[in-house]
Amino acid sequence: MNNLNSPFLPDMVNIWQQTMNWTPTVQQQDLFQKLYELILSGNSQQNLTRITDPQEFWEKHLWDSLRGIAFLLSRQAQENTPDKEESTPSLPSSPQSPTFIDIGTGAGFPGIPVAMTVTDSTVTLLDSTRKKVAFLDRVKDDLHLTNIKTAIGRAEEIAHQSQHRQRYDVALIRAVGTASVCAEYTLPLLKQGGLAVIYRGNWTEEEATSLENAVQQLGGTIESVEEFTTPLTHSIRHCLYLRKVGTTPSQFPRAVGVPTQKPL
Ligand code: SAM
């Protein structure tokens, strides 16, 4: 039963509304289903994800990806409702639509669900594995996701290239390294005022202390840490929101492998 909208599964649309104050359109639900099918078939050629059960896919790949930008989705949904309080965190005020990069996107998470929902923004999907990026290009073409760009490379190198350094409003990163490593990968890519969203499972005081130290060296600040539970399995998750408040010194990120071997 490879159908995310099967009547035998929980009412996913209702859960989006209750947990994020946002409802996917019928077209978006259709895109989620098609993405799921493409990933299942891509899995037969390469190891894209171990998460293939429909409920698990919905919760861990779709819901979790969008939870990091829930503040943005709920604001979009309320656009026509005056007198609503500004949600935090916020995006940098930019005359154009914000630009996103997803670092170490793998099979496209969180970047593809974000691109499907924030359709007036460009989302760059970066991964160091050529084969995974070839798969992402197929998804982009098959689903006509014209707001997706892809890039092959290591974050440590890409972030020194002028077409990427300080070019993005939002940098997303999930399951790529410790929080300090994620900070070193994301902050150099952000414009001043930009936001990094680091997706985490558990979160401890010790990690907070080392992240604080790393972020200071990189020209950023920890704006907020959100703790939440996932809606089906009630697992604990965290999203860390870092704001770029200064300039990242040019030596960051350090050479390939150094951020993971010698975290800041
Ligand atoms: N973000 C996806 C998710 O949450 O499902 C994939 C996570 S997977 C565990 C980590 C991915 O990051 C892999 O696809 C790997 O190739 C990529 N990766 C690891 N280090 C990287 C780096 N320094 N630069 C770019 N990609 C990297």
Image (spheres, grey):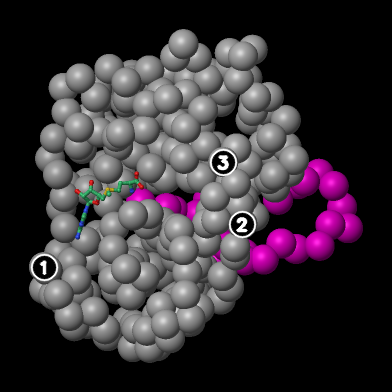
Q: Point out the stretch of residues depicted in magenta.
A: 75-102
Cα–Cα gap, marks 2 and 1: 33 Å
Quarter of the rendering containing residue 49: top left
Name the kind of residue labelled 3 in the image: Thr
Judged from the image, the secondary structure of the residue bearing numbered disc 3 is loop
Judged from the image, the secondary structure of the residue bearing numbered disc 1 is loop
Q: Which residue is mark 1?
A: 256
Query: Would you say 208 lies left or right of 253 here?
Result: right
Residue 167 position in % (x across, y down): 35, 63
Q: Which residue is mark 2?
A: 228
Q: Determine whether the beta carbon of the residue marked 1 sits less than 8 angstroms from the nearest atom of ligand 1.
A: yes
Quarter placement of the C terminus = bottom left
Judged from the image, the secondary structure of the residue bearing numbered disc 2 is strand
Query: Would you say 78 lies left or right of 11 here?
Result: right
Q: Which residue is mark 3?
A: 233
Cα–Cα gap, marks 3 and 2: 12 Å
